Image (tube, rainbow, N blue to C red):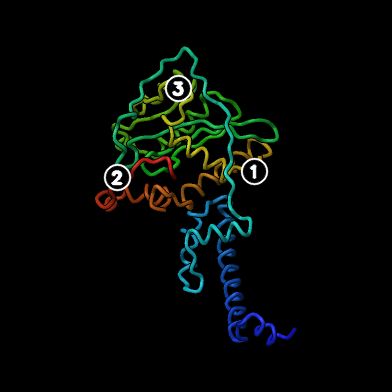
């Protein structure tokens, strides 16, 4: 059947048929450009979600031919099987049944921080390697969400947590530590005499969760753990040295390149630097604490 007879059969004109084909080709070309932009972003942030991906490719979408909103990008990635599937993993690393003193929760009813270095949250997570499990200790600023201390160790001893805390303290002069609250769970590492001496020597106020198993009392630290494991540290390292290199790279990408929903799509480094600069202190208001990042 010829094109003309087919058009007559379905009651459409040849012109409309060719225009529809041209629009389909234009749409396919535009979608290919959007997918290429997403692929470029995911070369460095391979498990970045769709909403944050939309923010990262916003400069590309300024072209009116490539108009694509949030729902459109979700639909496009779904059709091409490129939506990031969430991971659900849990392994307990906290042992709160010990002889050490447990400190009260000082942040439960406290207002959210209004500047960096007012509240740090700490936690410990495991990372599998082909030679066994290693453990990552993190210290995160609760205002900017910036990871200010990180250390990977082969054991659950307090030395790894102390090394992460030392790194955080090196980046925070004593003059900025006044009233700084250090919040963590009741794990042996954080309650140990050595860790508590380090906190007191630095002038930090200790705060801990109440009871066991309630992740919401240290929600921000748990959220940062999940982001690192799900979006950056999903490749099994060969050994401890490689795990440390991967963590160093992951922390840099998380701090400097990954946009955060709770920070209005800014990065932790941008918020941290802006708030600590003389001009930024008067321009930026409080950053609301939220489980969404």
Element at badge 1? loop
Q: Nearer the viewer, residue 220 or 50?
A: 50
Residue at the left extreme? Answer: 282
Q: Please determine whether, in this image, residue 78 is positioned above or below residue 14.
A: above
Q: Which residue is mark 3?
A: 186
Task: Determine which of the numbered discs, if any, sits on residue 110 in the image.
Answer: none
Element at badge 2? loop
Task: Determine which of the numbered discs, if any, sits on residue 235 in the image.
Answer: 1
Q: Residue at x 34, y 51 (%)?
A: 274
Q: Which residue is mark 2?
A: 286
Left or right: where 249 falls relative to 192: right
* Quadrant housing residue 180: top left
Does any portion of residue 16 appear in the rendered image? yes
Q: Mark 2 or mark 3: which comes first in sequence?
A: 3
Q: Mark 1 or mark 3: which comes first in sequence?
A: 3
Q: Nearer the viewer, residue 92 or 278?
A: 92
Residue at the right extreme? Answer: 1
Q: Position of residue 272 (x, y in %)?
A: 37, 47
Q: Please determine whether, in this image, residue 261 is positioned above or below residue 28.
A: above
């Amino acid at each position: 059947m010829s094109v003309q007879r087919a058009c007559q059969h379905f009651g459409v004109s040849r012109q409309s048929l060719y225009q529809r084909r041209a629009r389909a080709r234009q749409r396919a070309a535009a979608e290919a450009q959007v997918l290429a932009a997403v692929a470029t972003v995911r070369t460095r942030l391979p498990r970045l979600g769709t909403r944050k991906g939309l923010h990262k490719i916003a400069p590309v979408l300024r072209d009116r031919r490539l108009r694509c909103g949030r729902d459109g990008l979700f639909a496009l990635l779904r059709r091409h099987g490129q939506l990031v599937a969430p991971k659900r993993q849990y392994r307990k690393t906290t042992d709160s049944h010990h002889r050490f003193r447990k400190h009260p929760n000082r942040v439960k009813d406290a207002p959210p921080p209004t500047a960096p270095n007012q509240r740090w949250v700490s936690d410990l997570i495991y990372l599998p390697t082909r030679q066994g499990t290693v453990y990552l200790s993190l210290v995160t600023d609760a205002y900017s969400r910036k990871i200010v201390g990180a250390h990977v160790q082969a054991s659950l001893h307090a030395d790894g947590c102390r090394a992460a805390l030392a790194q955080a303290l090196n980046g925070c002069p004593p003059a900025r530590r006044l009233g700084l609250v250090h919040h963590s769970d009741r794990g042996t590492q954080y309650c140990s005499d050595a860790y508590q001496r380090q906190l007191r020597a630095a002038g930090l106020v200790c705060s801990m969760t109440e009871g066991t198993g309630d992740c919401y009392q240290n929600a921000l630290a748990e959220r940062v753990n999940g982001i690192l494991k799900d979006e950056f540290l999903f490749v099994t390292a060969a050994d401890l040295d490689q795990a440390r290199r991967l963590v160093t790279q992951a922390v840099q990408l998380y701090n400097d390149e990954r946009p955060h929903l709770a920070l209005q799509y800014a990065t932790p480094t941008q918020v941290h630097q802006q708030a600590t600069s003389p001009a930024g202190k008067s321009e930026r208001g409080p950053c609301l604490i939220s489980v969404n990042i």
